[in-house]
Image (tube, rainbow, N blue to C red):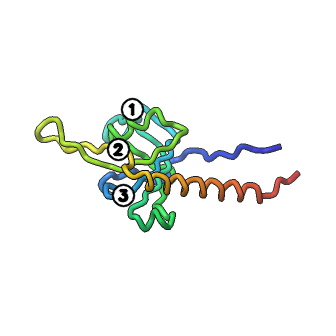
Amino acid sequence: MSLNFMDIPTQGGGWFKPADNNSAVAILIEVKGFDRQRPTPNGPKDSILADVSVFQSDADLAAGTPQIAKGQRIEQTILARDLADMVGSATIVTLDQIPPKKPGQRPAWVWRPVASASVRQDVVDYATKREAAVNAALDDAPDFD
């Protein structure tokens, strides 16, 4: 008998802060859940629960050593809504800001596709190797039959 192991999505990774990641070479977002109008101390917000791997530099990407936050909340309106239909999927993006529509408003954060095909492939290779390592560890675990 084979068990299908899954992680229970929990918020253990704090909140995603775009300003801390705006110069990242690539961001791998694995969307675990979406809550429409989740209650927060600042009023209800659309909220994504995701595992986020941030490659801050080319060196991080080449070494396959991103900053990883499992169970991170993404609650910036545009960022959350863009990921709402991706539960159970992943995407590779970067961040950008667009000018406000009205005077006095702050610029909005938006996702942008990774422009470089080689960067995208490096992130895919990282995720594939990580998945293979997890599967190898599960294969090595005793089955207690």
Task: Report the residue at 44% width, 40% height from top.
Answer: 48
Q: Dot 3 lies on which element?
A: loop
x 62%, y 47%: residue: 7
- Numbered circle sitting on residue 37: 1
Write the residue at 41% across / 39% down.
47
Spot the residue most to the front. 117
Contact flag, marks 1 and 2 (Cβ < 8 Å): no
User: Which one is in front, 76 or 29?
Assistant: 29
Q: CA distance from mark 3 to mark 2?
A: 12 Å
- Left or right: residue 8 versus residue 119 is right
Residue highlighted by disc 3? 24
* Residue 112 found in image quarter: top left
Residue type (three-letter) at the residue carrying disc 2: Trp
> Disc 3 versus disc 1: distance between alpha carbons?
28 Å
Amino acid type at mark 3: Ala
- Mark 3 residue crowding within 10 angstroms, few (<14) / some (14–19) / many (20+): some
The residue lying toward the viewer, choosing from 45 and 50, is: 50
**Residue type highlighted by circle 1:** Gln
Instruction: Pick out the residue farthest to the right.
Output: 145
The numbered mark at residue 111 is 2
Q: Please name whichever residue, 93 or 117, is drawn nearer the observer in this view of the structure.
A: 117
Q: Residues within 10 Å of mark 1 (few under 14, many from 20)?
A: few
> Of marks 3 and 2, which one's residue comes earlier in the chain?
3
Closest to the observer: 103 or 8? 103
Mark 1 → mark 2, Cα distance in angstroms? 20 Å
Of badges 3 and 1, the one in the foreground is 3
- Spot occupied by residue 15 in the image (x, y as percentages of width and height): 40, 50
Query: Could you tell me which residue is drawn at 49 percent across and 53 percent down?
Result: 121
What is the secondary structure assignment of the residue under circle 1?
Answer: strand
